[in-house]
Image: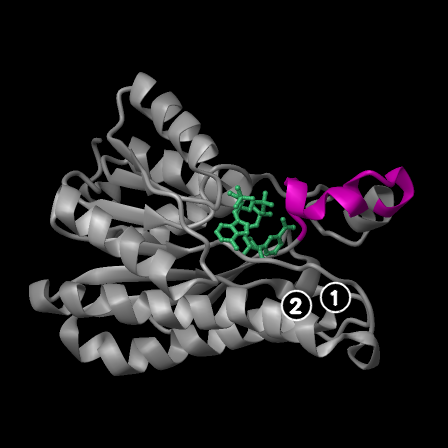
Amino acid sequence: MNNPLFDLTGKVALITGSTKGIGRSIAEELARCGAKVVISSRKAEACEQVAAELKAKGYEALAVACHVGRKDDLQRLVDTTLQTWGRIDVLVCNAATNPVYGTTLEISDEAWDKIMQTNVKGTFWLANMVVPQMAERGEGSVILLSSIAGLRGNSVIGTYGVSKAAEAALARNLAVEWGPKGIRVNSIAPGLIRTDFAQALLDDPERVRVAEQKTPLRRIGDPVDIAGVAVFLASPASAYVTGQMIVADGGETAC
Ligand code: NAP
């Protein structure tokens, strides 16, 4: 690592939902900058597999399975990381769910609760578990994955959008609360990114064409497009950035 602005040597980064898609790319790029990374998802085998792949590339990685909607799982994730590496310098709350499609009127209580529990409450729990030990050292970076779905109304994935807007708001609140202790908290709002999460849309060539056409950069994003923003927010390069939502959408919301 030549540029100290992007050097994460000696830092420990915990990334939820990091066995595939955006989370996996964030983990790999943070590791490339020198961070030790905690790989986590609901499936232990997938965590072990990804951690092994990163170790084979010469990076330090720890696999810990965790469902982010379960408080006990989150506590075990944090405790295992602290027992292993003694600190968490970068927290990326990336895992999220969107189990249903439909208007607000059509969403069941169960679906609403599942989306809010996984995407918002899990993030609230995890931030509260991790941030106090950052405060003891007087530094840390927390990154929440929001979405441009949280910026606009949508009659198909509106409840998911409400949860993503809440995550951006949570990032702002945490930034205000913990800024005096040297901790920065920001969110990233991706546009459409080529991952399993967006597979239903990506499987339809016509919808892909329309999505590309309404994006000034004329392409759908790749996970590394979001990982680059996460590297910036995790590193000293963004030392004076907190409480912000960084939109990475190929310009879609500029139109
Ligand atoms: P993805 O490719 O489907 O990957 C999701 C990751 O999270 C996987 O590792 C998955 O592994 C894990 N995961 C899912 N549910 C979990 C849970 N309850 N507890 C713990 N881990 C869980 O998704 P992605 O597209 O990379 O999305 C990552 C983030 O970006 C999400 O917050 C999403 O809202 C946001 N985002 C995505 C897009 C997009 O177009 N892709 C756009 C805007 C925002 P397991 O299934 O093994 O648990």
Along the line of sight, the residue nearer the viewer: 111 or 3: 111
Q: Quick one: quadrant of the C terminus? A: bottom right
Q: Which residue is mark 1?
A: 157
Q: Give the main secondary structure of the magenta stretch.
A: helix
| Disc 2 + disc 1, Cβ < 8 Å | yes
Q: Which residue corresponds to the image point at 15% horizontal and 64% vertical from the top-left?
A: 133
Q: Quadrant of residue 7?
A: top left
Rounded to the nearest angstrom, the CA distance separating label 2 from label 1 is 5 Å
Residue 241 visible to the viewer: no
* Residue 13 can be seen in this image: yes
Q: Is residue 184 left or right of residue 250?
A: left
Q: Which mark is residue 132?
A: none
Residue sitting at x 21%, y 42%: 8
Q: Amino acid at mark 2?
A: Tyr
- Between 199 and 236, the residue placed more toward the observer is 199
Task: Tell me the residue that label 2 is attached to.
Answer: 160
What's the magenta region? 192-207
Measuring from the top left, give residue 146's x and y in whole percent.
Answer: 53, 64
Magenta segment: does it hold 26? Answer: no
Place of residue 212 in the rendered image (x, y in percent of width and height, measured from the top left): 78, 45
Give SS at disc 2.
helix
At mark 1, the secondary structure is loop
